[in-house]
Image (tube, rainbow, N blue to C red):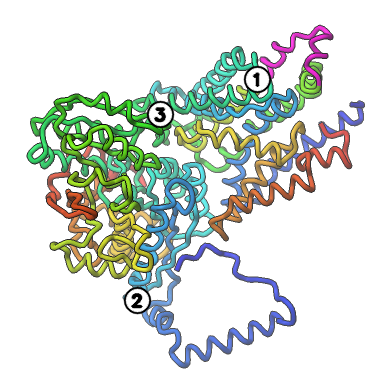
Amino acid sequence: MTRAASRRALALHLAVLALLFALQFVLPAYHHASLARILVLAAFAVGYNLLMGYTGLLSLGHAMFFAAGLYGAGLTVHHLGFGVPSGFLAGCVAAFLLALAIGAIALRTTGVFFMIVTLMFAQAGFLTALYFNEITRGDEGFVLAAAARVLDIGGQPVALSEPNLRYNLALAIFAACLLVSLVVVRSSFGRTLVAVRENEERTRLLGYNTFLYKLAALALSGAMSGAAGAAYALLFGYVGATFAAIQYSIFPLLWVLLGGVGTTLGPLIGTVLMFYLVDVSSEYTTAYMIVVGAALVLLVMWFPRGILGTVRQRWAPWLP
Amino acid sequence: MTDAKTNVNRSPRGNITRRGVVKALAAAAGAAAATGVMPGTMRYIQAQTSAPIRIGFQLHRTGIGATYGRWYERVTSAAVKLINQGGGIGGRELQIVTEDDGTDPKRGAEVVAKFATQHKVDFVFGTLFSHVVVGSSPAAAEHKMPYFVVSEGYHVASGKMNRYVFQPGITDVRAQVSSMAPWVTKNLGKKVTMIFPDYAFGHDHRDYFSAALAKQGGSIAALIPIPATETSFTKHFARIPADTEVLYHVMVGPGVLTFVKEMGEHFGSRRPQVFGFIDSLEGVDIASPGLEFLDGSYFWEAMPRYAGKDQTAFDKFYRQAVGVNDSGAAVSDPKDVSTYSHMFGCWETLYVIKAAVEKSGYKSPTAQDKKALVEAVESMTDFAESNQHPQGAKKFVGRIHQAFGHQNISKVNGKRLDVVHRTSIQDGMYEPEADYTKMPL
């Protein structure tokens, strides 16, 4: 990437973040609240994309990392009386450590086997959440008390359910994940990940310890997913095993495929589009998932690399 | 009756012009008003000029709750039709705005927010599955949205929801299982083995039935949790102690038919007494192949699926209004079996909302009017058995936002269920563990 292209990419990302910041002042209440939720989920997708898009590892178990963050924050706040910052940190650390542990085992496999192993671990995580029902309330889940979801800002307690605070916190978490992703992609570490994706044997032959690179990518991806999970628990006040179930491993895959695999902004576009596809089409038909499916098929036909992937291929090769 | 399609204005097509459509509509409306074609509309106009009451219906139209959702929607439509024929709520037409939550807690919360901020409804109602209720309740509190659930979970009565969440139309699982214990120990046996799904719903049964059983001098022979992903149950039946007098089962989901079939194969003709919750077979025909083993066993029912000798005039009225025959199936399709022990909750909840609106003088979704409505519901104490409450009389405990009612125990006789015992309301009541009324509004 030339210096000019690099500057253009950075400017684009900052402009997107500025646009997201500005949107809060003009969006109607429903879309304001929806976008806050979308930004948290988009952070999850950014984490997923780091592994799938740049390292070439297709995980079918990322719900476990999102859930690790969700429960790491939710349980510590609910049962141990942690505050919001320490609860959030607990969620991130839980997901990071889980990703390291899972990676140490699962990364001994590749391709389809990696998908199956991550799927199995995620299912084990889901069943664990159900099994320890006394603590987690299993499938039913639990609500984080409003009194526990309060952030101290300049000596003033402000509820996380306050729409503007929630929006900006969601944006901050998304922005952090996006910028970390951008920095990683543009670094030598990121280029090595791409090399692993393209030809792992050759990368190893060049002297790189590809296992460590993949492990680092998985740990970072897991930590981002966990940050999104922790943010979800704290900002929206609900913790439940549904978020550890298989569909929450499939969703980030779809968001990333839709937006553009291996593009830093693709996960955001995919998450936004998928949310509104479901939101609008479900008003008109019970078969809204067929509508979503048809839209995905059409997108694959016209934008085979996802929206931003195709844009990059045809018109803007400088897109990271 | 339901109106989820908010975008009803379409672009003119072909040679139909917008001006032409407006003229035609105006002429049609004038003619209709003049000839009395719209008596319903005219009645609301005469009664009160204010806008309709709009209730957001959080419906499990898709996902695991779709079978229940289909019947919840039919019952809601029937109740709304009747309420509007009777003059609406406080003279205002009742409109339902439906959104599918996919039986998913994340989508549920989004739907509640959408009702509050986009559809701008007055209240939200109709949620069944516990995880969707729990997941949606923070959104209800944030938007100060009165949220009437029809879920039967203990979550509302536990005090873990918030001031805006009510369950006035159906009893909760703790009350249900507690009221079963006296009859079970007296008539079936005192040594009980419980088989239950190994998640929150099953654990509620385990905990509250065990406690109620102990109070009656009974004992648990064994507790057998079944993992959520189990598809074969034979190995679990081997864990049932030989001295078990009563087998208590409460399996739900797609594995139920396999569960019953394998239970029959395990026990053969020498089985203990079997007692279950109809939740296992809601929407399923008792005469389905594979369920023969259940003949002679007993079930809890909130509302008897089969019209029996003790059928009330209220049940007859309700059954006819919602289009259900004497066997609990759709009149239009006898193979379409209803969720009779749950769906009445939608009917009764709508009438509680109607009573609360009229009692509180609620006019619009302002903070003041919502406060008055919440307090009006909390001040309610009794619902008499009537066409509005066809399942039976109920007591409402405002402190925990929960209704208590009668329960039924039915025996499988051949290919139908017959009620053998009806509990008193008192049998299911327990000391409240919370007080929502002390929470700020």
Q: Secondary structure at mark 3?
A: helix
Residue A218 has which mark? 1
Is residue B427 shown left or right of residue B42? left
> Callout 1 environment at 10 Å: few (<14), some (14 to 19), or many (20+)?
many
B8 lies above or below A173: below
- Is A207 inside the magenta-drawn segment? yes
Q: Secondary structure at mark 2?
A: helix
Question: Which chain is disc 1 placed on?
Answer: A
Residue A119: image quadrant is: top right
Q: Amino acid at mark 2?
A: Gln
x%, y% of residue A62?
A: 59, 28
B124 or B103: which is nearer to us? B103
x%, y% of residue A303?
A: 79, 44
Q: Which residue is mark 3?
A: A130
Is residue A32 shown left or right of residue B281? right
**Extreme top residue here?**
A207
Question: Which chain is disc 2 placed on?
Answer: B
Per the model, the C-alpha gap separating discs 3 and 2 is 47 Å
B315 lies above or below A267: below
Q: Amino acid at mark 1?
A: Leu
Question: Which chain is disc 3 placed on?
Answer: A
Q: Which residue is mark 2?
A: B85
Q: Quadrant of the C terminus of chain A?
A: top right
Residue at point 34% right, 31% down? B233
Per the model, the C-alpha gap separating discs 2 and 1 is 61 Å
Per the model, the C-alpha gap separating discs 3 and 1 is 25 Å
- For the stretch drawn in magenta, what is the main secondary structure? helix
